[in-house]
Amino acid sequence: MISRRGFLAGSVALLAAPLAAEAQQTGRMYRIGYLGEGTPENALVLEESLRELGYLGYVEGRNLVVERRFAAFKYDRLPDLAAELVRLKPDVLVTGGNPGIAALRQATATVPIVMAWASDPVGAGLVTSLARPGGNITGLTLGTGPEFVTKELQILHEVVPKLSRVAIVREAYRRGAAETAALESAARKLGLTILFADVRTTSDIEGAFATITRSRAGAILILGGNTTWASRQQLADLAVQHRLPGICLFRGYAEAGLLLTYGPNREDLNRRAAAYTDKILKGARPADLPVAEPTKFELVINLKTAKALGLTIPPSLLLRADQVIESLIHAVGDKAT
């Protein structure tokens, strides 16, 4: 029996073969440099992008070379790895979140950089504007502006109407003034008090929950990043242990046991990053390619977690859900960035 993964891989190869053959006739071998903040086992940006590039005619080993470097969640390694990739003279550099983008930006002002899911790239100083990024960086943003954060807090408030205090679990690099102001503004509109529990590495998760418990927060909102993604099972388990309804961006957190997720479809962002890579390999300049925002959003509710927390999900919210999980899915083996 042929597995679904095997069938898809075979289909990609068949579809890509004519285009790859055409590219080979030109004698051109393209080179991509990929910078991962995590590990090879957590390389969803690369996996999804390469699959999509296969449909576009790029086949690794035939007309494509991919140079891979992984920081294994040791963010202080990113600058050296970025510089190493630049020295290999790639046609384009690809990465996921802000730490990787910033490291590549520091390493080169000329080699094109594609970002798969930047958080507030304008506020972070990565691009001049979404419409006119300028420089050598373009790609996609998570679209997590004030309206988006407000939506997540609204959903939490729907589930817990008497909610008054929310803890924001965020990675240290997301302490930017613009995002912090957006969170504070959203909280004021809803009459909520927020506090921040910052984490740098996975070892900070336990301490963050100790802070949250002392603050008597009634729920948590997780600002996603590579460290929190790698710790999503631990975060979900601790949230249930401390009886805290939680919400985050990506579906994988709800599959790990967090109560709610609302945000862009991460796989779609990674696939769309491949389209940017293709355009650049064909001669487009990053400065001329507007940064795109998400187009696919999904609300996922974990009913098993709701039951464990003693919560009743409002029917109106259930009707809006794109997916309802009724049994716990341990998603530790899922890919990340």
Image: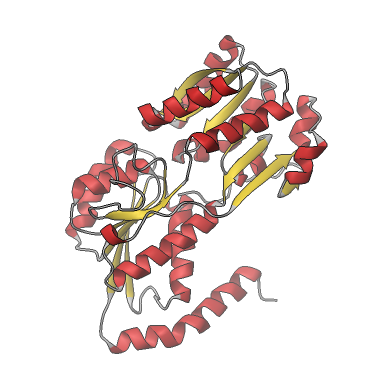
Numbered label tally: 0
Residue for point 42% across, 31% down: 179
Percent x, y for residue 37?
A: 38, 45
Quick check: 171 above or below 210?
A: below
Percent x, y for residue 225?
A: 46, 39
Residue for point 38% across, 54% down: 291
Q: Quadrant of residue 5?
A: bottom right
Percent x, y for residue 297?
A: 60, 50
Q: Quadrant of residue 263?
A: top right
Percent x, y for residue 36?
A: 37, 50
**Nearer the observer, 132 or 16:** 132
Picture quarter with the N terminus: bottom right
According to the image, what is the colour scheme of the structure? secondary structure
Q: Answer with left or right where residue 128 lies relative to residue 47.
A: left
* Residue 218 seen: yes
Quick check: 256 above or below 92?
A: above
**Nearer the observer, 29 or 323:** 323
* Residue 234 seen: no
